[in-house]
Amino acid sequence: MNNCIVTKIIAIPATGLLLAAVLFTGCSSRGPLEPEDAAPPEPLDVSHIPNAVPRPEPLSRYGNPPSYVVRGKRYYTMPSGKGYKERGIASWYGTKFQGKRTSSGEPYDLYGMTAAHRALPLPTYAEVTNLKNGRSVIVKVNDRGPFHQGRIIDLSYAAAVKLGIIGYGTGLVEVRAIDTSEPDPTHMTGAGQEPESALPASQEKPRVYLQAGAFRERRYAEQLRAEIETRKLGEVRIVEPAGKSTLYKVQVGPLQNTGEANRINRGLKTLGINDGHSLIQ
């Protein structure tokens, strides 16, 4: 279950344009919820399962190579998770991998509060928030993945139950790395405690978009927007360069659910955009 950030440049001969797509993919040989994977036979009562407690830990000897290759693709690990925050699709994994060795060397425990990510250093503690219902959990990232298109994190079965995505298989989430070098008392939760929801009932839920590409010249962004609109994949916007960015970003959305994200990704394949794409606000 690995999760890395890779920038891929795709040349389109007809125009010579460069398409920069941000990919979120992973490093284990497994995919989320493969047919033989499953939940435990008995429903899980998560009321007694505490969140992971963030604490400083040395990096895993085995889980942090500078890069690794899975299914012919090379992925790059991040030297630090400090400042990392991303929105995207979460999936979960269950009984098939119970007790098996994770990328960090620890055995997988489907009843533990853990997760897999393609790029974050192992271990990293992260707060994961379900963007649909506002529930948040804290997990220890100790594995690599997921490797399914468009997904940014694979959660343990227990973490998925606590977030309320177990019945759907996937969910739209925000993942935020916790800096353990500067302890935040609000995240040092103990047994039975939950972090406060990141989405109070009176606050509007974040708008999530799927990024299809980024261009140095606006005309190429306009071209891609027109092609997406022709295929009726959804509403398309172009985000102007801001700050240090020099790119015009083409984004589709806002997304209503993961099913819509999967549909759009399938449609983008007809444009030659075949890899996973980041989901952002």
Image (cartoon, rainbow, N blue to C red):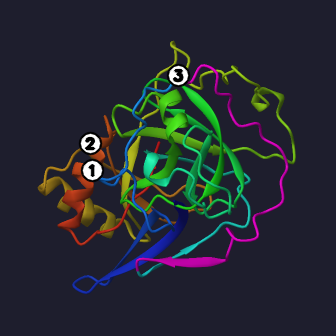
Q: Residue at x 66, y 44 (%)?
A: 126
> Chief secondary structure of the magenta span?
loop
Q: Nearer the viewer, mark 1 or mark 3?
A: 3
Using the image, tell me which numbered label, if any, was put on residue 259.
Answer: 2
| Location of residue 135 by image quarter | top right
Mark 3 burial class by Cα count in 10 Å: few <14, some 14-19, many 20+: few
Query: Considering only order in the chain, which callout, 3 or 2, is on the residue closer to the N terminus?
Result: 3
Task: Tell me which amino acid carries mark 3.
Answer: Asp
Using the image, tell me which numbered label, if any, was put on residue 148.
Answer: none
x%, y% of residue 64?
A: 69, 70
User: Residue 69, relative to residue 254: is it above or below?
Assistant: below
Task: Tell me which amino acid carries mark 2.
Answer: Gly
Q: Nearer the viewer, mark 2 or mark 3?
A: 3
Task: Tell me which amino acid carries mark 1.
Answer: Asn
Q: Dot 3 corresponds to which residue?
A: 45
Using the image, tell me which numbered label, if any, was put on residue 262.
Answer: 1
Number of numbered discs overlaid on the protein picture: 3
Which of the pair 244/86 is nearer the observer?
86
Q: Residue at x 41, y 40 (%)?
A: 208
x%, y% of residue 39?
A: 40, 39
- Asked which secondary structure carries label 3, the reply is loop
Which of the pair 16/163 is nearer the observer?
163
| Location of residue 248 by image quarter | bottom left
Image-based side of 230 in relation to 184, left or right: left
Extent of the magenta region: 45-71
- Asked which secondary structure carries label 1, the reply is helix
Q: Residue at x 78, y 41 (%)?
A: 54
Callouts 1 and 2 close, C-beta under 8 Å: yes
